[in-house]
Amino acid sequence: MGAEETGEVKDAFAFYLEYVKPLYCEIEAIDNTLPVELLFEIHAAFDHLRRFYVDGEDEAKSTHKAISHLKRGALDAFKIKLKYFNTELESLLTSSADLTLIDSGEFLSNLLRDRYEIIKLGTQARLAESRNDHIDAFGKWSQVSIAINRFCENYLHNSKKLSWAKRKSICLKSKATVIAFLIGCASSFIVSWLMTFSSQH
């Protein structure tokens, strides 16, 4: 899982730097807040390290418990990242931009395909957790995280294509509204003319 565990305090800090801190920064960057779940686990981890330094607890025991809390915190962070991703994706799919206009429909088709892949990976990660296979679960959640980053880069944060689709959609809707208005006016005129014509004959 990256940092090799030797039972030394430095392993806890290595795990924190390699896994927890990057996730911490990612989530914080989304809306400038941090979830309580993650903060609780970080607090618990460093409390175990305190027991080694202050209370004289065995270093390997303190380190193992600290890393366990950090792992749980990282797993929580992965799920929170997935939650934010789903919210952002839902916002895009229900926006005014017609995604079928981008790349002749390929953009939306690829988006749905890649979303399914993230759902599949997330399901596998949750199943691994339900089996208490934390190593496999962590590996699966790492794959989910990487897939989300790639998805965001290709779709959610593709501002050029999304801006174009939004402008195009507004233009098409405006044209459709004008055409509908003209058809309505023409229909009203024809009905009025026919009624006038029939009353005269």
Image (cartoon, helix red, strand yellow):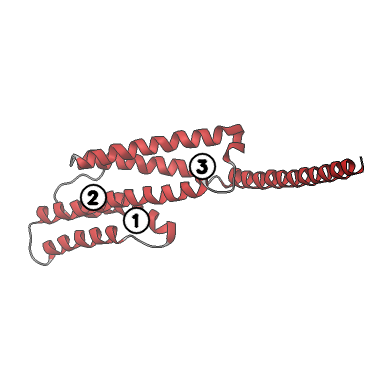
Q: Residue furthest bottom?
A: 54
Q: Is residue 188 left or right of residue 138?
A: right
User: Which numbered disc flags the more N-terminal residue, 2 or 3?
Assistant: 2
Q: In the rendered image, which quarter is residue 143 located in? A: top left
Instruction: Classify residue 9 by image quadrant.
Output: bottom left
Tell me where residue 48 sits by quadrant: bottom left
Q: Is residue 1 visible?
A: no
Looking at the rendered structure, the kind of residue marked 3 is Tyr
Which residue is under mark 2?
Answer: 71
- Count neighbours of disc 3 (C-alpha within 10 A) and say few if under 14, some if 14 to 19, many if 20 or more: some
Q: Between label 3 and label 1, give the one nearer the viewer.
A: 3
Of the two numbered discs 3 and 1 on the same chain, state the one appearing first in sequence: 1
Which residue lies at the image location 84% right of the left edge and 44% below the top edge? Answer: 195
The numbered mark at residue 155 is: 3
Q: Secondary structure at mark 1?
A: helix
**Front residue of this view, candidates 146 and 93:** 93
Tell us which disc is closer to us: 2 or 3.
Answer: 3
Element type where label 2 sits in the image: helix
State the image coordinates of residue 25 (x, y, percent, origin top left). 38, 56
Which residue corresponds to the image point at 25% horizontal and 38% vertical from the top-left? 127
Q: State the residue at coordinates (40%, 51%).
A: 84
Quadrant location, the C terminus: top right
The type of residue carrying mark 1 is Tyr
Q: With 16 as the anchor, is 90 left or right in this view?
A: right
Q: Which residue is mark 1?
A: 24
Total labels: the figure holds 3
The kind of residue tagged 2 is: Lys
